Image: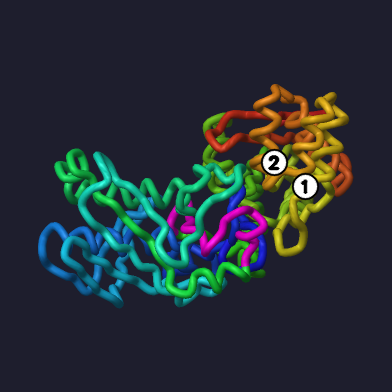
Amino acid sequence: MNGNPSTPGHDGAEPHREAEPHGEQDGRPGLRTGFTTGACATAASLAAARWLLRGAAADAVTIALPAGRHARFDLIGHEHGDAWTACSVVKDGGDDPDVTHRAEIRARVWRGGGPGVTFEAGAGVGTVTRPGLGLEIGGPAINPVPRRMMAEHLTALAPEVVASDGLTVEVSVPNGEVLAKRTLNGRLGIVGGLSILGTTGIVIPYSTAAWRASVGQAVDVAAASGQRHVVLSTGGRSEQFSQRLYDLPEVAFVEMGEFTGYALQRCAKQGVTAVTLSGMIGKMSKIAAGHLMTHVAGNQVDLDFLSELAYEVGAAPALVAEVRAANTARHVQELALREGVHGLFRRIAELVVDRGESLVGDALTLECLLFDFNGTVLGRATSESWVR
C-alpha cells in the first residue's frame, strides 16, 4: 500500500499499504490511525460536486465511512473552470504514516459521462495495465470501495443529475508519480502513479507494536470470556465472511492482521482449544509457505511456490507456467478458477494447518478457511483431531 515499498496488510492484493479513525485510538492504546486515500478522494469529490451543483464552496465536508462512522475533512484547495470544479484535502496517515502521508488528494468534477458516476485518473493516479487487481485493464487505479463511496455520496447529493447526464470524477495526487516509485505499483502493472485505496476508510496500521499487543489482548479477552473456539482473520473482510459461517459471539473473532504465529501461540497459552484461521489467497499463501509473520515488507507472495503447488495438484503445464508468471496472488486465484483447479486452494489450506501445527503442536486443533473476494469458501482444511 502506500507506506512501504510493498503490498498491503489487508485482505486482497493491493499495491501499497495505508494506515486508517483520524486522531483516534479506536480502543488500541497509543495507536492513532489515519484516513485512506479513498476516504480523502470521497471528501474532495463531494465538496467539488456540491460547489459545482449548488454554487457554494465550503471550507470542510463530512462523509460517511464504510466503517459506520462519519469523518470531517478540511478543504485546502478550490479551483474551477467553465464547467468544472475541484477541491483538495490533505491525507493524514496517523501514527503509521505511509508515502501518501500529507499528500494532497484532489478531485475534479463535471457533468457528463453518461448515467452514473464515471472515474478518471488524473495526474499522479495510476492506470491499470495488468490483471489480478480486480480492476479493468486500462482504467484508473481507483479501487472498488473508494469508487462505491464516491458514487454513493454523489448520488445522494444529486440523484437526478447522476441518473441523467451523470457526473465524472477525476482523482489526482500531485507528485503521485514520484511517490509511486516507493511502492510496488510498477511491478504490479499500475503505471503513472498511486492507487486510491481503502475498504473501511480507516485502515488500521498493522505494522506497529501496539497493534500486536492489541491482538494479544483480544485473544486474552476471548479466552477470559470462556471462548474455546477463536476465529483469527487476516483482515476485516475475511472476519466478516467468517462471522456468516459461525454462530459465535463477537468476542470470539480476532483480526490478527500480520501476526499469525503470535496469535496462535497466544491462543494456546490462554487455553483456547480450537482456532479457525481465515483469510484470502495472498496472506494464506504466505502462511502456507511458512511465513507466520505475514507483513509484506518481510516477504512477498512466492509465485514459484504457488506454481509448485499447482503442479502438485495436477494442473496442466501451461497453467503451472502461467501461475509462475502471474502478477499477484489474486491473479493466481483467477487462473486456477478459470481452469477449474480447485485443488490448489484446498492444498493451500492444508499447508496453513500444517504450519500452524508445527508451531503449536497438539495444543490447538486448527481449521483454515480460504475465501475469495466475495466470501465464497475456495479452500478448507482441518486438523485430523479437529474439534470445536
Left or right of 288 in this view: 111 = left
Left or right of 189 in this view: 339 = right
**Horizontal and vertical percent position of residue 335:** 68, 32
Dominant secondary structure, magenta: loop
State the image quarter where residue 309 is shown.
top right
**Horizontal and vertical percent position of residue 337:** 66, 27
Left or right of 35 in this view: 53 = left
Which quadrant of the figure contains the C terminus? top right
Q: Which amino acid does label 2 sit on?
A: Leu
Residue 335 appears in view: yes
Q: How far apart are marks 1 and 2 (CA)?
A: 10 Å
Residue identified by numbered label 2: 277
Q: Which of 265 and 193 is in front in this view?
A: 193
Give me the residue at 79% from left, 49% from top.
Answer: 302
Q: Which mark is residue 287?
A: 1
Query: Is 377 one of the magenta-colored residues?
Result: no
Look at the image and give the residue range highlighted in magenta: 183-201
- Give the label, 1 or 2, closer to the camera: 1
Which quadrant of the figure contains the N terminus? bottom right
Q: Which amino acid does label 1 sit on?
A: Ile
Q: Residues within 10 Å of mark 1 (few under 14, many from 20)?
A: many
Give me the residue at 24% from left, 73% from top.
Answer: 79
Residue that protrudes farthest toward the top in the picture:
340
Residue 363 appears in view: no
Q: Are marks 1 and 2 in contact (CB under 8 Å)?
A: yes
Q: With respect to residue 279, does 335 lie above or below?
A: above
Give me the residue at 27% from left, 62% from top.
Answer: 62
